[in-house]
Each structure stands twice: as structure tokens, then as C-alpha cells.
Amino acid sequence: MINWKVILNIAKTHLMTKMKSTVTAALGVTFGIGAYITLVSFMTGLNEMLDSLILNQTPHIHLYNEIKPTEQQPISLYDEFKNSVHIVHSIKPKQSQKKIHNALPILNYLKNNKKVKGATPQLRTQIFYLSGSIELGGNLVGIDIMEETRISNMRDYIIGGSPEALKNAENGILLGSGLAAKMSLTVGDRVQISTVRGDVFPLKIVGIYQSGIADIDNIQSFANLKTVQRILGEAQNYITDINIKLFAIEKAPTIAQNLASQFKVTATDINQANAQFETGSNIRNLITYAVSITLLIVAGFGIYNILNMLIYEKMKDIAILKATGFSGRDVQLIFMSQAMIIGAIGGILGLIIGYGLSRLIDNVAFETEALPTITTYPISYNIAYYVIGITFALLSTFVAGWLPSNKAKRIDPVRIIRGT
Amino acid sequence: MKLVLETKNINKHFRKPNDFHVLKDISFRIKKGEFTSIMGKSGSGKSTLLYILSTMDTDYTGELYLNGQLVTGKPHEELSTIRNKHIGFVFQFHYLLSEFSVLENVMLPAKKLAEKSHVEIEYGAMEKLEMLHIGHLANQRASRISGGEKQRVAIARALINNPSILMCDEPTGNLDSHNSENVFNIFKRLKEEEGLSLLVVTHDEDFAKRTDRIIQMEDGRIIS
Ligand SMILES: Nc1ncnc2c1ncn2[C@@H]1O[C@H](COP(=O)(O)OP(=O)(O)O)[C@@H](O)[C@H]1O
Ligand SMILES: [Mg+2]
């Protein structure tokens, strides 16, 4: 039977009479936890921001038709040469088209698939932008604009005009911001484009697209799928790319494989595309935890020292307590309680300070072209960090309190009372 | 008559720095309500014996009975409870918890025992303090009172759980004759009015002579 009331009362009295040490020890914990919360909120905020930047701009699965030589060349199909060395020079891809062979059935299939959040057809083609005497090479991407804005954050990157304007315009174009700057064009102006074959079309600028990546913004523009098909003189089923968003991103590799074999197209998934990306996140997490744990270890040593000193000073008290019927475990609990009280108070204070600092950072202005929707530094508020933080605090004070309190538990009262 | 304390062939050695047979075949009995004193030269083993009898020291051979029950060999937790409930102990140096008030010092063992409510414990503690004529000090810090007063607070603390026996190691050793007399009278009254059993180590011949019985020790043996 542990008599918590008495134990906590004694612990409290010890802490109160040693206010300075108590405060110092608690502040150590506060510092560690505060730093952890701030760091982890900020780093995770950054990670999530970068993640969403990549994830939203990159389809989970990208289907297209890669032009490459047939893997099974005629010579390897011929049995007579099976055991011979094949020497055929200058193998070329079979005359082929960039078009995905049966794009419409694939799209249909995907739209009825429960794992797929959305699939958008694209038609990418090379064009020239003509403006007066200027002729700039670039791309035009035909898209289903409303479907694109539904499954990606494309809307955020349209800095003038709107997706709806493109949808409603027969010959509209969302001009890349770099192109617009080079050609001194703005929304409402007209731009002439020429296909590779030399046909010229006038298009009306209904919006400016800015991804923040200069290499893209200097060459790429968007128009409605139908518009591009018409410009190229192709049928409605002429589609070069299909972008797929899934409900569960983890399934991307398997689904990509299935699609590739089922429809004989090339399918890349986001994990292939962004393998390096994980590394950045992991390193940021590593830094956060390394710094926080270091601070907590320092705080833990502080608590360890203070408790050790306290126990040394309180030898006589411990002897009296034991002589009057407190057990070794009671004595240990008295000192463990002190450690845990320091940990709890310091930890909670640390959570509050961490939250305060996070709010502060959250309000600091941070603007970048690449992230049109971001105006302040990103902070991730997640209750889990606060739970981890307080657990950290209690755990480290528990470890720091264990050794000294265990020593107190084993103090032999007879030796103290004898005075040797 | 009932025995409150009995020892059978208690022997103890100190092994460090070298083997030293400090207690030799200690066997004696104390009856309920008896006021016994232990005398002997310095170094004869009186304190060592008292620490064994109070169950704080368990490193000995032989048997120790309290209220007819064998306590030798019981686990530490249980011994703590026995000390708490059945044994009052007063040291030569009236150790009190200096950060607590006089009243809290007295109440602490009863709070640990937790058999009574806080109010009852406080009432009992005040009663003990008043019996020892130090009721007015109840709310003083324990570090702020005189030596004689501290010793009486220590006695009040030892009595708070109404123990079977009160053990004292030279309780008057640090007190002047007036305060010594005072302490003796308190003990006498406790024995007569409450039937308390007492075992008091003392150097004071006058003190010892007025007790029921004197145990003489020499070189770790009881000689009479
Ligand atoms: N921890 C110890 N280690 C070795 N010898 C000790 C220890 N404690 C006490 N002694 C010795 O045991 C003897 C008895 O001590 P003690 O019981 O304190 O005597 P008394 O109380 O009768 O003066 C003394 O000679 C003392 O030096
Ligand atoms: Mg002694």
C-alpha cells in the first residue's frame, strides 16, 4: 500500500524549499521540449509544404507511349539463329506515334476504377510562339482544365485569369509566365502559335500560368484538349499522356505495373519519380530529433545532478523517514515524484512555449514564386508532437531520477544515525 | 505477564575494517509496561543492540520477537510497517525534518500508517504535544526550536502511533539536568498512565536507578 498523499506532500515540501534548483531543473526540460516542438512543427511544416508541392504537381501514375525499339526483334524470333550471335546494325524504333493507342477505353476504365481519384487526358505537342518578329519554341499541353483543377492544385498556379475562363473560351490559352514576360503579353491579348508542320493559329490569352520553375514557365502553356487536337488536325482520341491520381498513393507502383501490362503503355509511378525526395524529409527529421534529444539529455543531466545533491543534503531526513516506518520504496517514490513533477511542469511549460514559438513563426512572412499559396512560414500543428513531447519529458526525467532515487532507497538509516 | 520484546542468542559481527564480534549471545525479555534501562561503557554495543531491536539493522544471527511474533527474517517492507506501527524510536540527536512544522513532524508516521483520518491524526498529534507541554510550538518550523523542545517533539513523534514499545538511545545525553528530569518524568508518566513499555539506553546513573530494571552491558555481553 503506497500512501501517495504523504509521499507527494514530502516531495512538494522538498521542491518548495529548494525553489531555485527546482526552477533550474524544470527550465532545462522546458528548453528541451520547447525546442523540440518548435523544430518538429517547423520542419514538418516544411516537409509537408514541399511534399504537397511535389505531390500536387506530379501525377501518382503517368501513362504515355515511349518510343523505343521493339524488344523482340525479328531475328530473335527466328529459331534457326537461336544459338548464334546476332549482329544487326542500326536498329530503329518502328514507325510509331506518340499517341496512346487506346486512350479513350483506358480513361473509361480508370474513371470506373474505385481506387482512382481522377484521370486526366493530356496532349503534349511542340509549337512555336509567334509575336511580331519573335519566334519562340515551346510546348502546348491540351488538358481537361476542370478535371485538372479538381485533382491537382493547378488553380493555385494560375496567376491571372481563371480555369473557368479557359474552359469557356473556344481558342483560349493559359500562357506560361516566362513567355508572357518575354513577349510582353497579358491576359486579353492574342498570341499566334505555329505547329511543327507550319500551320498558324491565333489564340486568346485567358490566363497566365506560373509554376515558379523558370524552365517550365519559359516554354509551356496550356489550352483545352479539343483546341490542341484541332490545331494538330487529330481526332478526339488523340491523347499522348494520361495523369492519374489515386486515393491511396502507396498503391501507385502496383497499379502502375498492372496498367502497363494490361494496356501496353509505359507507366511511371510517383515513387520512382520522387525517390530522392524522401531523403530530404528524412534528413530534416533526423536533425529535429538529434537536436531535441541532445537538449533533453542535457536537461536530464541537470535533473540528475540536482536530485543527487538533494539526496546528499537530505541523508538525515531519509534516515528519519526510514526509522519511523517509511520503506525504501516510499523513499524512492518521494524522490521519483520530485523528478516527475519537475518533468511534468517543465514539459508542459515547454509545450506551451513550443506552441507559442510555432505561432510566431507561422506569422512570419515568407513569399516565393514557386509557392503562390504560401505567404508565411509553414508550421505543422499536430497533436501527436505534443504527446511525443510530454512523453519525452517524462521519460527523460524518469531516467534521470531513477539512479539518485534508487540510491536514496538503499541508504542504510543506521549508518546515518550513527553518524559514520 | 505478556512479553513485548524477547531476544534469543543475538550475535552480531562487524566485518569491516576487521572482524569484530560486537554483540555476544544477547538474550533477554521485556514485559509489557516495564521501564527498562540499558547501561554500559561507551563502545559496549548498546546502540548496536538498539538498532537491531528496532528492526533497522537486520544483519545479525539469533531471534527477535516482538509481541510474541518472530520478526527476524521478515522482508524489509514488512519491517518498515512493524517499525511504523509498533516501535517508537528516539535518537540521541533529536532528528527532525527541518523543513516541516513541529506538528507535521509529529503527524508524519501516522500519515504513513494511514489508519486514521487527517483530522484525527492532527488531533492526536496535538494531544501528544500538549501532554509534553509543547502544544504552543505546533506551528513552528522544526528548525526554529531549542534542543530540549526538539527532544520532546521527537518523543511525541515516537508516540503518535501508540507503539508497543518506546526505544531511546541516550535521550538525555545532550540535555541539561532540568531538561533531563523533564524527560524522565514524561517517561515515568507514560509508563504509569498509559502502561507503555520503555527501553532506554542511558549513561545517567540517577536516571537508570529510578527505572524498573537495569541491563548492564560490557564488551557486547549482558552481564546483569
Ligand atoms: N559500522 C561499524 N563498523 C565497525 N565497527 C563499528 C561500527 N559501528 C560501531 N562499531 C563499533 O562497535 C562497537 C559498539 O558500538 P556502539 O554500539 O555504538 O557502542 P555504544 O553505543 O555502546 O557506545 C564500538 O566499538 C564501535 O566502534
Ligand atoms: Mg551509543
Image (tube, helix red, strand yellow):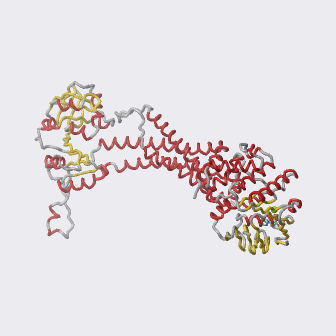
**Where in the figure is residue A367, as x and y percent of width and height?**
39, 32
Judge from the rendering whether residue A231 lies leftward or rightward of residue B152; answer left or right.
Answer: left
Q: Tell which of A10 and A325 is nearer to you.
A: A325
**Quadrant that contains the N terminus of chain B:** bottom right
**Residue A186 in the image: above or below residue B84:** above
Judge from the rendering whether residue B91 lies leftward or rightward of residue A357; answer left or right.
Answer: right
- Quadrant of the rendered image containing residue B60: bottom right
Q: Quadrant of ligand 1?
A: bottom right
Residue A190 seen in the current view = yes
**Where in the figure is residue B67, as x and y percent of width and height?**
69, 67
**Residue A84 in the image: above or below residue A372:** below
Residue A419 seen in the current view = no
Judge from the rendering whether residue B91 lies leftward or rightward of residue A106; answer left or right.
Answer: right
Q: Tell which of A279 and A352 is nearer to you.
A: A352
Going 43% across and 47% down the picture, which residue do you hit? A384
**Quadrant that contains the C terminus of chain B:** bottom right
| Number of marks in picture | 0
Judge from the rendering whether residue A253 lies leftward or rightward of residue A396; answer left or right.
Answer: left
**Where in the figure is residue A10, as x and y percent of width and height?**
64, 49
Q: Tell which of A376 and A233 is nearer to you.
A: A376
Q: Tell which of A54 and B139 is nearer to you.
A: B139
Going 17% across and 64% down the picture, which residue do you hit? A76
**Where in the figure is residue A244, as x and y percent of width and height?**
23, 46
